Amino acid sequence: MSEDQVSYWYRRALHAFASIFIAYYLLPDHGEWSVVKKIAVILSISIFTALEIYRIISKRNLLFGLRDYEKNRFGSYLYFGIGAAVLLLLFEQQISIPCIVSASLIDPVAGEMRKRGALYAYALSVTLSFAIFLVVWYNSPSPFSIIVPLIAALAITAGEFKKSKLLDDDLVMQILPAVVIAILYYLVMQIYGISILPDKIIYPIFGVDA
Amino acid sequence: MMMERKFVIPLIVILPFLVSALMICHSSEAIASGDTKFLGELSLAIIILLGNVVFQIPLLKAIKTSLSCRERAEGKRRR
């Protein structure tokens, strides 16, 4: 029983831990640093994908905390990693940062709140992700400083609660709001000619500011 | 399981503190010199720190319980 509890909380803590992926933006974004950090992301995902393929083929239980249904498919952690890698490599930080932080914190919080009822879980998921997006988007042009966090919060909650057998919620929760915001960004840019992106939120800790 | 206990769990506990501390120091230095564009980074660092602490406490408690259960079982076996 106590080992089950360790496994249970290990999964929750590992999920919250993923929020530190945004430390990627603390590294400089110029010269060789820009290439090195991108290669590090791709390499990490490749190593973990290879590890997962080996685990599935060899049928050996290499990892602690895996659920039964993950024994014959990629672990959720890899889906989260792939989602975070796509966001870090392809999206602007104003979009990727709140998506990664929200997905990493909302999923375990919503999981805990589900014990008290689905309504609590929905409400908390929307409120928390709205707050996280607002922190990043508060200085975006009005009314997008409110519209974007609201749309993103609804997209994250939909990604969390609409389960699919093909796509893990850890992947959907990150990519869905990012794609929705990116579409909104391009639509507004095309129709009104203005950028709705707010200022950058994280600046490199050393080196020239990008 | 032993590998997780020795390497992964300490990482899960320590790294979020390090990253949040780094972000807090980085942003508060800039805020102290009047640069308010770092307020977002400071807020994110606090969110990350709190979010991780909330799930680390039950994890550490569960590990402690698991270890004491194991010690008790070993003690009984020895007797």
Image: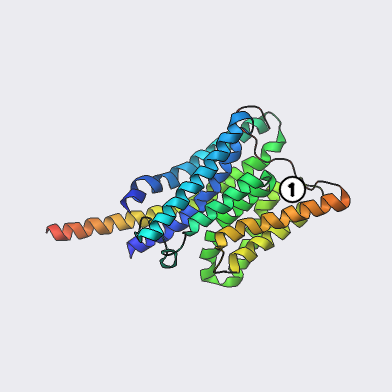
Furthest toward the right, the residue is A192
Residue A96 x/y as whole percent: 64, 48
Please, what secondary structure does the residue beneath circle 1 have? loop
Check the image and report above or below for A177 versus B15. Answer: below
Check the image and report above or below for B29 versus A146. Answer: above
Label 1 chain ID: A
Left or right position of A195 against B50 = right
Q: Relative to the observer, which residue lies in front, B72 or A40? A: A40
Residue A192 x/y as whole percent: 88, 51
Residue A11 x/y as whole percent: 45, 57
Dot 1 surroundings within 10 Å: few (below 14), some, or many (20 or more)?
some
Residue A198 x/y as whole percent: 75, 44
Give the labeled residue for mark 1: A138
Amino acid at pointer 1 = Tyr
Left or right position of A116 against B74 = right
Furthest toward the left, the residue is B79
Left or right position of A57 against B45 = left
Q: Relative to the observer, which residue lies in front, A117 or A133? A: A133
Q: Residue at x 33, y 49 (%)?
A: B3
**Residue A6 is at least partly visible in this image:** no
| Figure label count | 1
**Residue A94 is at least partly visible in this image:** yes
Q: Residue at x 49, y 48 (%)?
A: A46
Q: Quadrant of the N terminus of chain B?
A: bottom left
Check the image and report above or below for B41 versus A172. Answer: above
Q: Relative to the observer, which residue lies in front, A75 or A111? A: A75
Furthest toward the front, the residue is A57
Location of residue A105 (image quadrant): bottom right
Q: Residue at x 63, y 35 (%)?
A: B27
The figure's colour scheme reads: rainbow
